[in-house]
Amino acid sequence: MSKALVAYFSASGVTAKLASKLAETTGADLHEIEPKQPYSAADLNWNNPNSRSSVEMKDKAFRPEIANKVEHMDQYDIIYVGFPIWWYVAPTIINTFLEQYDLKGKTVIPFATSGGSGMGNTNAELAGSCPGAVLKEGKRFSISVSEPELKAWTEQATV
């Protein structure tokens, strides 16, 4: 029996709601990826090229620090990793999260929320952060996704 973890970063609370629903649907443990320096509304202003999120996303090597870690990551076989889509990809804090652990042999399944953007180049940008893992194709969800839809997706994604 595989043990699953839903790890997520949520800037505004939308991804947190989806992650909670996913963990409940799958029976997975839940872990919030907390930035060491929380993001303010000004930090998240994508219209400002000098905002923290804009600066971070322009530098693909940037790795925001994380305040917490998953205890006993080795017990998980499947890691669902959730985030809002920023600039058509996962925020670089997701790379930070993945790079903290040895994920060889684990299955990593991205999921995202967005006001309208798709997953873009997310998998290509995450692949180098989880060497040796099986990185599945991610999916963007609406916050109104039903539990049966989530369950069907997880069954297909874990095959």
Image (cartoon, grey):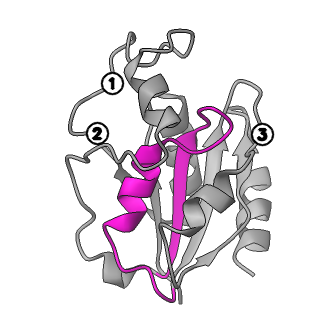
Q: Residue at the spot x=37%, y=57% of the render?
A: 97
Can residue 8 be seen in the rendering of this structure?
no
**Label 1's element?**
loop
**Label 3's element?**
loop
Give the x, y percent position of residue 145: 74, 40
Distance from the alpha carbon under mark 3 to that under mark 1: 23 Å
Q: Which residue is mark 2?
A: 35
Badge 3 or badge 1: first in the primary sequence: 1
Q: Which residue is mark 3?
A: 118
At label 1, counting other C-alpha atoms closer than 10 Å, the crowd grade (few under 14, some 14-19, many 20 or more) is some
Q: Residue at the spot x=32%, y=75% of the render?
A: 73
Q: Which residue is mark 1?
A: 39
Callout 2 amino acid: Pro
At label 3, counting other C-alpha atoms closer than 10 Å, the crowd grade (few under 14, some 14-19, many 20 or more) is some
Q: Which segment did they paint magenta?
A: 77-105
Badge 3 or badge 2: first in the primary sequence: 2
**In the rendered image, which quarter contains the C terminus?**
bottom right
Callout 1 amino acid: Tyr
Circles 2 and 1: CB atoms closer than 8 Å: yes
Give the x, y percent position of residue 77: 49, 82
- Magenta stretch encompasses residue 25: no
Can residue 80 be seen in the rendering of this structure?
yes
Label placed on residue 71: none
